[in-house]
Amino acid sequence: MKPRIRVKTCQDYDGMLRRYIRPSLGERVLAAIRPLEFQTTYQKMIERGLSARTVRYTHVVLRSAMRQAVQWRLLLENPADGNRIPHQSRGEMRSLTVEQAKMFLRTALSTPHGPVLAMALTTGMRPSEYLGLKWQDIDWTRQTVSVVRSIRKVNGRWCFGDTKRSRSRRPIKLQSWVVALLRNLQTQASSSSLYPEAQDLVFKTALGQPINADYLARHFKAMLDSSGLPRIRLYDLRHTAATLALSAGVSPKVVSEQLGHASAAFTLDTYCHVLPHMQDEAVARMEMMLGAQTLAS
């Protein structure tokens, strides 16, 4: 898998095997493994208090490995087939309201992290995407930013990589006040850096290093607390951007393209909680267009 997946994904797979699979199955002879042993492994994970998502993810990786063994004719059949795995309930979508978003921005813009958090809230980009932006990605004339890479810290080293999927490579229109923030940030930016991986990055620490998402998340939560706002994850700024755009009447197709989703259908399924409001507004507009009050009289 290593040549075909991102470094971070490979690291996740390796960690999952090391923590959950090898301790119970690592010494077993491949041809002697039975489905019940996989089921027992999953049950032990559940008893340890691991989430359904972790168990399901482990099962997917393990089943894929066993499928490859079948293709290599090391096994006659896949022992991971037919196992029962826990159902994963959909987590509650958390986002800021319009008033909460305004309050948050007022707090954020009074700190050095204001520009990066404004970018997160207004574009819906993933943390690994906006933290990996370079000045060359900004089209000042069109007021757009191109998402073409991601950045992550893997094993203590900063690594640039592709976006999550090919569809994630996309241009995003910026709001005018965000462009002004970036212009101001660029005038203050140093053209040189002691850290080669931070060269030309839009967002950096005071020491000129790339910004770690975990580090930014800690400051983000402190801002929420100081503003009296509910605690959400840094990633939930992406959900906030999508929810606010849909609530404002932006086409789901446009929101889908901005977020880099695989399809508009996926966007609608993810943010179905916004649909009732959109339907109310759609009915009101249709009623005004058809002049329903006139017809009723």
Image (tube, rainbow, N blue to C red):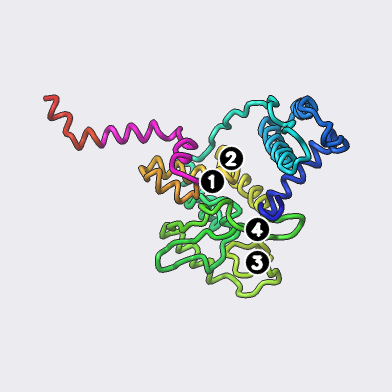
Q: Amino acid at mark 2?
A: Ile
Query: Disc 4 residue type?
Result: Ile
Question: Going 74% across and 60% down the picture, which residue do you hit?
Answer: 157
What residue is pinned by disc 2?
232
Mark 3 burial class by Cα count in 10 Å: few <14, some 14-19, many 20+: many
For the residue pair 261 and 223, the one nearer the viewer reads as 261
Q: Where residue 284 sits in the image (x, y, percent)?
A: 27, 33
Q: CA distance from mark 1 to mark 3?
A: 24 Å
Which numbered disc, 2 or 4, marks the residue that appears first in the sequence? 4
Q: Are marks 1 and 2 in contact (CB under 8 Å)?
A: yes
| x and y, in percent, of residue 146 in the image | 49, 61
**Residue in the foreground of this view, choosing between 227 and 148:** 148
With 32 as the anchor, is 262 left or right in this view?
A: left
For label 4, count other residues whose C-alpha is less than 10 Å away and answer few (under 14), some (14-19) or many (20+).
many
Q: Is residue 199 above or below residue 239?
A: below
The disc at residue 198 is 3
Left or right: residue 2 compared with residue 184: right
Magenta-drawn stretch, dominant element (helix, strand or loop): helix
- Between discs 1 and 4, the one toward the N terminus: 4
**Secondary structure beneath disc 1?**
helix
Q: CA distance from mark 1 to mark 4?
A: 17 Å
Mark 1 or mark 2: which comes first in sequence?
A: 2
Separation (CA) of disc 3 from disc 2 = 28 Å
Quarter holding residue 84: top right
Q: Is residue 266 magenta?
A: yes
What number of labels is visible?
4
Given residues 218 and 11, the one toward you in this image is: 11
